[in-house]
Image (cartoon, rainbow, N blue to C red):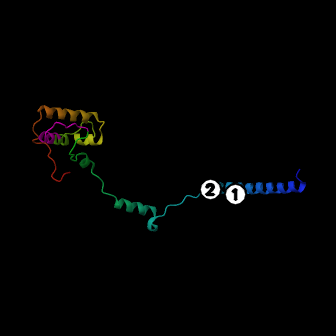
Amino acid sequence: MPSFTAQAGRARWIALVAFAALAAGIGIAWQQSRPVRPLEPPVPGGETGDRVIEQALEEAAPPIDSTAFKQRWLDEVRGADVSGLDARRLELFIRHANAGQCTCGCGYTLAGCRASDMTCDVSGGRIQALLDSIRAGHISSARGIRARPRDGG
């Protein structure tokens, strides 16, 4: 049986460890309860936010003309199975697809609509009809139809 002094010494150590754990817990709780201050992002060159926005807009690329983008020349038509077309018929198909307008309301050429929206039922059907007509020989000329631009675009 341990003596009274041994039990008192052990109790002191237990009390000391318990006090240290309590102090650590209070310290952690106090640290976590403090509000976190968000860091403000540095402003380049000490400039105000408005000036930074103006500078970014000045350096941005010029806006794209949506009409020019929608009417751009495309050398291939997404989703169109052109296998079996000889070079002359393929060129005929590409020219008609780049000249014909999609009637879904998008403002694109048939080729452009297929490039931007493969789910368009209007351009999909019109492209297939164009391919069928070229394969069957119903369309054999591109006279008066838009030609490939010389600059490639």
> Could one spot residue 107 in this view of the protein?
no
Relative to residue 45, is residue 90 drawn left or right?
left
- Frontmost residue, 1 versus 149: 1
Which numbered circle lies on residue 27?
Answer: 1
Residue 116 percent location from the top left of the image: 29, 42
> What residue is rendered at 25% in x and 45% in y?
70
- The answer to if 88 sits in the magenta stretch is yes
| Mark 1 touches mark 2? (CB < 8 Å) | no
Q: Residue furthest front?
A: 1
Residue that appears at 28% across and 33% down:
121
- Say which label, 1 or 2, has the lower sequence index: 1
Drawn side of residue 98 relative to residue 14, left or right: left
Assess disc 2: are there few (<14), some (14-19) or many (≥20) residues with their C-alpha within 10 Å of its C-alpha. Answer: few
Regarding mark 2 in the picture, which secondary structure is present there?
loop
Q: Which residue is mark 2?
A: 35
Task: Residue at 54%, 60% (x, y): give it.
Answer: 39
Q: CA distance from mark 1 to mark 2?
A: 15 Å
Q: Quadrant of residue 63?
A: bottom left
User: Start and end of the magenta stretch?
Assistant: 79-93
Q: Amino acid at mark 1?
A: Gly
Question: SS for tag 1?
Answer: helix
Q: Is residue 10 left or right of residue 45?
A: right
Residue 132, placed above or below residue 12: above
Q: Would you place residue 40 above or below residue 143 in this image? A: below
